[in-house]
Image (spheres, grey):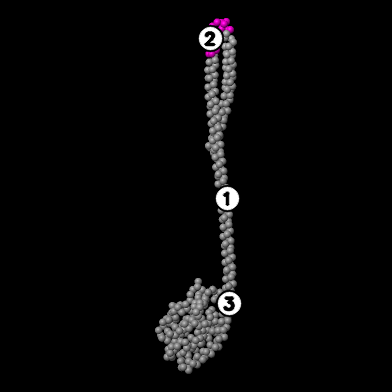
Amino acid sequence: MTLSSQQTVWSLVLGVMLALGLSAPADARQKQQDEHDRREQSDKRAEKHAGKHADKPQAKARGGNVAPARAKARNNVDNRRRDNRRVERPAQAQRRQQADVRHQVQRAQAAQSQRRQSQQRRVEQQRQVEARNDRQRVVRQQVERRERQSRTNDRRVLEDARIRDQRREVARGQNDREQRIRRDRQRADRFQHNRELRQRQAAQRARALQQQRRINQYRYQQAYYTRLRQHQSRFDARNHDYYNDRYYSTPANYRYSYGDRWHETNRYGADLIRQAVRYGYEEGLRAGRADREDRWRSDYRNSYAYQDANYGYQGYYIDQDTYNHYFREGFQRGYDDAYSSRYRYGQRDGDGNFAILAAVLTAVVGLQLIN
């Protein structure tokens, strides 16, 4: 309870006590006034009765003393009336005061009742506001809970989808890896089986060079065939571990155009294509110098190395035709540089040997990054 409410209650109590304290004397005076009024009315009746019945015999007996008696009676009546008025005025004032006190008490009670009702209304409004806020808070919590659950479900669905994609990708990668290994094994077997055919071709070509007395070109072809056999024998000597070779587990990230269509490979296949161009350029330099020293016409297509185009190839990563194509592209440019001694496609390296220019290599290969 606030200070103003306590003051109001104490004012009401004081007013009630004052009213009770004044009401007791007022009731006593009221009784006295009523008793006085009854005596006065009794006196009036007695006076009237005496005036009607006793005045005449007395007047006859006393002969002229009636007037003073009446005057004295009237004076007595007037005195009693004045006394009554003197008694009545304080009683009326006291009654008015009591009425004022009762009116003030009623007003205080009415004001207190209004304040109590107003306070109750405020409390009820506050309760309603708090209840509405509680309901809104509950609704927000439910919405947030549903949103969190939805996000959790979405993340779970995305994670499950990602895991499924990874599994499919792994399975696809494994299938692709198995296909690559199986394809390269078959290709390597075919390449090895054609070794005798390449050997017969080299022997026929050597006899033709001897008949043409192209000594330098004959020496170059013999040296090329020796390097080719050594390279292939090293490949035969080792047991290639396909499953530990990173080429078969690395996704494709390059593409190149050959045979009027696009092919894809990874960095290991791309390195093998660049190697084919570099090896072809080096072999073309040797063949071009040999023909120039033999004073033979420029004819790179008639060279055995150009026709074979397998030096550096082992039967895997890319097709044999693809390797032959890029080897011959490098061979043609190396042959032209050496035969004409102009070296438009290459330059000397730090060891004094000629090597194809990086820009030319990039243009010939034409590899494009996928991702």
Residue plotted at (53% across, 82% down): 320
The reply to whether the C-beta atoms of the residues labelled 3 and 2 are less than 8 Å apart is no
**At label 1, which amino acid type do we have?**
Arg
Q: Which secondary structure is most common in the magenta stretch?
A: helix
Residue plotted at (59% across, 9% down): 54
Pointer 2: what residue? Answer: 67
Q: Nearer the viewer, residue 31 or 199?
A: 31
Marks 3, 2: nearer the viewer: 2
Report the Cα–Cα distance between label 2 and label 1.
Answer: 98 Å
**In this view of the protein, can residue 280 be seen by the observer?**
no
- Outermost residue to the left: 342
Task: State left or right for residue 131 relative to residue 284.
Answer: right
Residue plotted at (57% across, 62% down): 155
Is residue 64 shown in magenta?
yes
- Outermost residue to the bottom: 211
Q: Which residues are magenta?
A: 57-75
* Secondary structure category for the residue under label 3: helix
Pointer 3: what residue? Answer: 179
Q: Could you tell me residue 283's position as x and y percent? A: 47, 85
